[in-house]
Amino acid sequence: MLFNTYQFAYFFLLLFPAYWSLRRFPRLQNGLLLAAGYYFYACWNPKFLALLLLSTVMDYACGIWVDRAEDPRRRKVVVGLSMALNLGLLGYFKYYNFFAESLQAALAKLDVSVSLTQLNVVLPIGISFYTFQSMSYVIDVYRRDLKPTRDFIQFATFVSFFPHLVAGPIMRPTSLLPQVASPRRFHLTQFYEGVYLIFWGLVKKIVVADNLAVLVDSLFGRWQTLDGGTTLLAVYAFAFQIYGDFSGYTDIARGVAKCLGFELALNFNLPYFATSPKDFWNRWHISLSHWLRDYLYFPLGGGRGTKIMVYRNLMITMILGGLWHGAAWTYVFWGVYQGLLLVGHRIATPWLERIQPTDPVDARCWKALRIVVTFHLVCVGWLIFRADSMEQVLGMLSAVASRPAIPAAASLVPVLVIVLPLMLVQSCQYLSKELAFIARTPWYVRSGFYTACFYALVLGGAFGGGKQFIYFQF
């Protein structure tokens, strides 16, 4: 079930009053949310409910076992069991064919012919998200950051909470589980904030992302014929497509959760205003980058040790982060590229600090320059991320270098019409340092904004079409 469909609208309009009619009965509310989450997930493929239930039951039991165990070795065994199950599910459904094909191709280059069985399996939607969330619960209990819950309904509701079930944000158990365990109260202000986020998220998805997708798919589909200017336009358009698509999903998820009395983590914070690669990852897909930091980078050693060890930790974290996104070599190279950016930034930081201007005007210009440079470094990464092969990446980069040109108006104008209003709003949010900038403006400004968004949805959106969100494939 997609957020941008009438099916979800009907589903939520039925769930909302039923949910709040049970506000005096938190256990019944949780039971309703659990049923809603399983129905929401089953709308894609009911068969995969068994995987969701398996992961839930195993990690619920592992949380209790690891808390009861006193022997450190036994505690590690329980955590290892949880990780083996969750990563095993990911490996089987998401990565087996990729690694089998890669190994077969590598052996073929050595004149070794091996026929490896290929699995005819469908990737369960959202498996990368809910396995990470469920697994982090056991790790947090192991670290004694959290006491395990004995209420299975609460835990199952935490895992299957439908607003963020299939594409995040990846919620920490220390944040979401207490909200599930506590009674919720309806607050009108929170409800208004939720409606605004749903509305704005739909605009970003079906007006910005879905319209850009048509152009992006067309240009990337005929990349061999593009000149340099059109290639750049395709990459820029994809940068805003994926931002509108994923941040739009997150806004809707956070808005729906607010309407139900929950607060989900902020997942995007104006990422294209980042001043460095490190700053970008503090603003983009924040829940994943923080998950990788806390459960992978820090356990590897983090910023401790020699410089080589720190660089190694950064590279391993980002390569695995790239592989998390998909079973393809382009995602691996994207992770390598992001790791190199972080390592390069870490090496350059002392030099950048020495040349930081002290004059206020110069400092603002320097900051603007860093934003522009960082954005283009990120866009190179988006080219790798979107391309079907490294041959396509190199071919499109070659076009930029060897065939510079101004993009045709037929392609350029639609992108500007879609992107410039979005960037105007983002610029106001950035300059005011307030993501809820619109809510703080006078009523006539808000009215104009909401009216413009409404007509954009009606005239430029495809609400009934229900185009799938990009991150659903991960």
Image (spheres, rainbow, N blue to C red):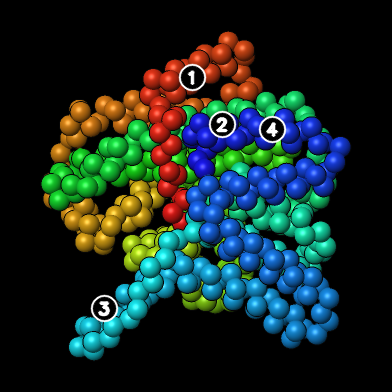
- Residue type, numbered disc 3: Ala
Q: State the SS at label 3.
A: helix
Tell me the amino acid under the disc marked 1. Phe
Give the answer, above or below, for where 450 lies relative to 279. above
Which of pointers 4 and 2 lies earlier in the amino acid sequence? 2
Q: Choose top left, top right, bottom left or bottom right for residue 29.
A: top right
Asked whether the viewer can see residue 353, the reply is: no
Question: Which amino acid type corresponds to the residue marked 4 in the rendered image?
Answer: Phe
Contact between marks 3 and 4 (CB within 8 A): the answer is no
* Place of residue 210 in the rendered image (x, y in percent of width and height, measured from the top left): 38, 36
In the figure, 359 relative to 137: above or below?
Answer: above
Instruction: State which tag comes first along the sequence, 4 or 1.
Output: 4
Q: Which residue is mark 3?
A: 105
Residue picked out by circle 2? 9
Gap in angstroms between the C-alphas marked 2 and 3: 47 Å
Q: Position of residue 46 (x, y in %)?
A: 54, 54
Mark 1, mark 2: which one is toward the viewer? 2
Residue identified by numbered label 1? 454
Residue carrying label 4: 16
Q: Are marks 2 and 3 in contact (CB under 8 Å)?
A: no
Residue 239 or residue 363, whichever sits in front: 239
| 3 or 1: tag closer to the N-terminus | 3
